Image (cartoon, rainbow, N blue to C red):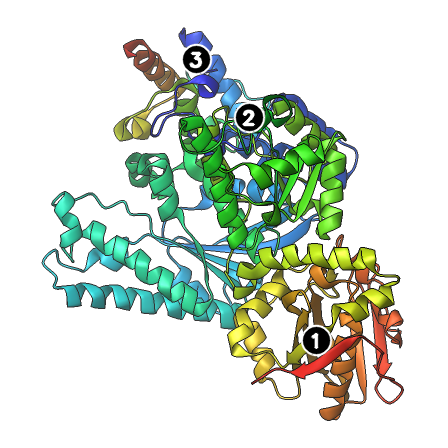
């Protein structure tokens, strides 16, 4: 078929397949789709459709999967989370919905979409009786063309006039963002402006403040600044058009035919980019990059070719390609991604390369979990996740060998395994294109995570040499620094609330504004905990939000409690509860109320409240497996720990 | 490629697009005669045809195809022109 094999070019038929190049190509699309639709149960149909969404679908196949998906309705299913998304646009966007839903399915999100009436977003936002309000979106995406914003600016505008016009457009947008958050309590995502303006002067456009292309570029710069200030997530389609070429994203004919600003053939890529941002907002981005060694991190096979024989580093193009991957992995590590190794090799041989090869950019200490043995890779990957205390679905596995990739996908489909190109020169680009580590923040915590995992190795060593757990905990010499949420730590607190899946009692996700509201709320209580020990600073690792329970003023409800998996089993949960009880007592509370709301990931805290001395509080909760607990403050004795207390400087 | 083969491909594409295997296109079929083939479906169909055959229709052509046959003949001509 021409669509599968044609040579790729700008706007060429193969565009969507090329744009989703890291996903494996489907082998039997029709057969799998039929089997999915004929499966006996609703969850089974969803799982099979999701497995299809994990593949590199064409434009038409994406629509077919979506038809199958929408036929299933919005009925919930274990392993899938529902989400309501409103798309407010000043161009036609209906054609993007199938791709958005399929890309959501790729992340096991069931996205229900409300598309606002064409260019009616201002009115809809201002009218509490509108369909938008009835839909109650959790997420609002603004997908706007820059045409109106720049229409009134004359070509001869002075720099001040141009900036003023841009400023006015940005101010209007900020007003819309505020409205969406305050009136709808939705998280806001703003798409960057696609710069479709043709040059008027040529290269000199960049020097003319009123040139349309320059105005749009400036608009995007100001948009990014405003979004960061307002805590709005960006969907950077402008960047994607630079990556793929404007022709892959914009088709003048379609614009004229139906005001499609995103060309229909780019819809699968659009959906993927949006679903990534949504996943990042919900803490579903991947956390760990697992690297194969031979022919991935270096060229050749260390066991056969030896230290002198492998291809790595300056001097050969292939050697530099592998080195480039190492440098990219290091950059990821610096932004908080955990690195691990999974390779079929003798451990000593593999580790020796990290220690003794002069061209290695990655050091042994950069690798938080190192698995080199002859076991099945799937089993090793499972063990890596266990050792790092993260979900298997937080892993990305990079391996040059198609057989290993297929085997891992087969036994652990929740691991992301990019379809690496044959040429190592393109490894970095493939990994970057796949966007597994999409993020909506970058905190001081992220920058230190690498060191923190390295320090964990020292902690492991202490644990092994300790006679008992008590002995180990005493030997850690832990200190907790705590207090109410501080403005300077807010982005980390928000990140912790949104990314923590395991030690998370209610899995309520809050935006920065929403958290700020708790900080100012009369009678509410926020607590943040930073854990230090003799091996270093574990960072801000736990947060609690307690708020007065409506109707019973002397009961505080533990609305949210999250803790990083890095500090499980260090008695911090005891210490945090000790402090919550003290702080609640100071506020005049008599009791704490707390719910446990189960998710597929937070089983580890199912029995936390009874362990901490809470008693069942009746009131059966609607959600299956959810439990409600109460703790009377006078009956509480402070739980013994090996943690020293220090107050946070306010 | 013959007009017949192009027409068969069009039928398959439209069946996939609308999830309706009862569709059989003829040279005389008009869009209004096919259930659920709305204007968005028409654009999607044009895009799918362009991608499958590696051709591109002009804005004026997309606006004025009077029936499926006209679209088949235009596709045939574009393919022949290379």
Q: Earlier in the sequence, mark 3 or mark 2?
A: 3
- What kind of element bears circle 3? helix
Depicted A450 relative to depicted A324: above or below: below
Quadrant of residue A357 within the rendered picture = top right
Give coordinates of residue A28: x percent, y percent.
63, 21
User: Dot 3, crowdedness within 10 Å: few (<14), some or many (≥20)?
Assistant: some
Disc 1 residue crowd, few under 14, some 14–19, many 20+, Cα 10 Å: some
Q: Residue furthest top?
A: B2
Cα distance, mark 1 to mark 3? 74 Å
* A147 relative position to A441: left or right: left
- Between marks 1 and 2, how big is the CA–CA gap? 62 Å
Q: Nearer the viewer, mark 1 or mark 2?
A: 1
Name which residue lies at 59% across and 55% down. Answer: A450
Disc 1: which residue: A479
The percent position of residue A628, horizontal first and vertical second, equals 83, 71
Would residue A11 appear left or right of A542 to someone viewing this image?
left
| Residue A107, position as x, y percentages in the image | 62, 45
Q: Secondary structure at mark 1?
A: strand
């Amino acid at each position: 078929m021409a669509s599968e094999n044609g040579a790729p070019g700008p706007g060429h038929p193969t565009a969507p397949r090329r744009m989703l190049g890291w996903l494996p190509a489907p082998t039997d699309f029709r057969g799998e789709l039929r089997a999915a639709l004929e499966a006996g149960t609703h969850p089974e149909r969803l799982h099979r459709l999701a497995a299809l969404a994990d593949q590199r679908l064409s434009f038409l196949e994406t629509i077919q999967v979506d038809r199958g998906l929408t036929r299933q309705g919005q009925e919930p299913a274990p392993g899938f989370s529902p989400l309501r998304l409103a798309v407010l646009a000043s161009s036609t966007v209906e054609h993007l919905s199938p791709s958005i839903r399929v890309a959501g399915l790729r992340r096991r999100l069931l996205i229900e979409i409300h598309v606002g009436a064409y260019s009616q977003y201002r009115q809809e936002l201002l009218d509490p009786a509108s369909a938008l309000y009835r839909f109650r979106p959790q997420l609002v995406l603004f997908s706007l063309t820059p045409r109106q914003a720049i229409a009134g600016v004359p070509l001869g505008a002075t720099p001040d006039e141009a900036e003023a016009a841009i400023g006015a457009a940005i101010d209007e947008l900020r007003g819309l963002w505020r409205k969406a958050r305050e009136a709808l309590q939705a998280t806001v995502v703003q798409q960057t402006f696609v710069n479709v303006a043709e040059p008027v002067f040529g290269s000199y456009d960049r020097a003319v403040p009123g040139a349309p292309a320059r105005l749009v570029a400036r608009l995007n710069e100001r948009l990014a600044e405003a979004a960061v200030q307002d805590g709005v997530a960006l969907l950077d389609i402008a960047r994607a058009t630079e990556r793929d070429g404007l022709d892959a994203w914009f088709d003048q004919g379609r614009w004229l035919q139906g005001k499609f600003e995103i060309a229909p053939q780019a819809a699968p890529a659009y959906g993927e980019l949006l679903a990534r941002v949504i996943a990042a907002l919900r803490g579903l981005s991947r956390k760990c990059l697992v690297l194969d060694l031979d022919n991935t991190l270096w060229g050749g096979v260390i066991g056969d070719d030896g230290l002198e024989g492998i291809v790595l580093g300056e001097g050969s193009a292939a050697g530099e390609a592998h080195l480039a991957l190492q440098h990219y992995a290091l950059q990821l590590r610096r932004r908080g991604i955990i690195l691990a190794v999974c390779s079929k090799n003798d451990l000593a041989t593999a580790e020796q390369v990290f220690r003794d090869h002069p061209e290695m950019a990655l050091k042994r200490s950069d690798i938080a979990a190192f698995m080199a043995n002859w076991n099945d890779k799937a089993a090793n990957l499972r063990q890596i996740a266990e050792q790092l205390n993260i979900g298997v679905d937080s892993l990305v596995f990079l391996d040059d060998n198609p057989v290993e990739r297929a085997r891992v996908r087969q036994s652990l489909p929740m691991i992301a395994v990019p379809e690496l190109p044959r040429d190592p020169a393109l490894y970095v680009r493939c990994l970057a294109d796949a966007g597994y580590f999409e993020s909506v923040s970058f905190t001081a915590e992220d920058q230190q995570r690498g060191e923190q995992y390295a320090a964990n190795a020292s902690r492991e060593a202490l644990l092994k040499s300790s006679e008992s757990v008590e002995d180990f905990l005493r030997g850690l010499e832990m200190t907790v620094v705590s207090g109410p949420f501080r403005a300077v730590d807010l982005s980390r607190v928000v990140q912790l609330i949104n990314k923590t899946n395991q030690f998370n009692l209610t899995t309520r996700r809050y935006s920065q504004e929403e958290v700020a509201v708790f900080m100012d709320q009369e009678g509410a209580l926020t607590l943040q905990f930073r854990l230090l020990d003799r091996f270093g600073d574990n960072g801000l690792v736990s947060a609690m939000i307690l708020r007065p329970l409506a109707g019973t003023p002397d009961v505080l409800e533990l609305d949210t409690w999250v803790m990083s998996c890095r500090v499980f089993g260090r008695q911090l949960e005891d210490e945090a509860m000790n402090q919550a009880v003290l702080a609640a007592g100071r506020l005049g509370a008599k009791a704490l109320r707390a719910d446990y709301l189960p998710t597929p990931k937070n089983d580890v805290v199912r029995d936390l409240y009874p362990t901490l001395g809470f008693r069942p509080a009746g009131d059966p909760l609607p959600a299956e497996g959810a439990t409600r607990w109460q703790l009377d403050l006078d009956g509480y004795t402070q739980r013994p720990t090996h943690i020293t207390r220090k107050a946070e400087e306010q | 490629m013959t007009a017949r083969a192009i027409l068969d491909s069009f039928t398959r594409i439209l069946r996939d697009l609308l999830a309706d295997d009862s569709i059989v296109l003829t040279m005389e079929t008009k869009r209004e005669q096919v259930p659920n083939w709305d204007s968005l479906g028409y654009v999607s169909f044009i895009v799918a045809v362009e991608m499958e055959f590696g051709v591109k229709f002009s804005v004026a052509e997309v606006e004025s195809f009077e029936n499926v046959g006209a679209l088949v003949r235009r596709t045939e001509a574009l393919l022949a022109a290379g």
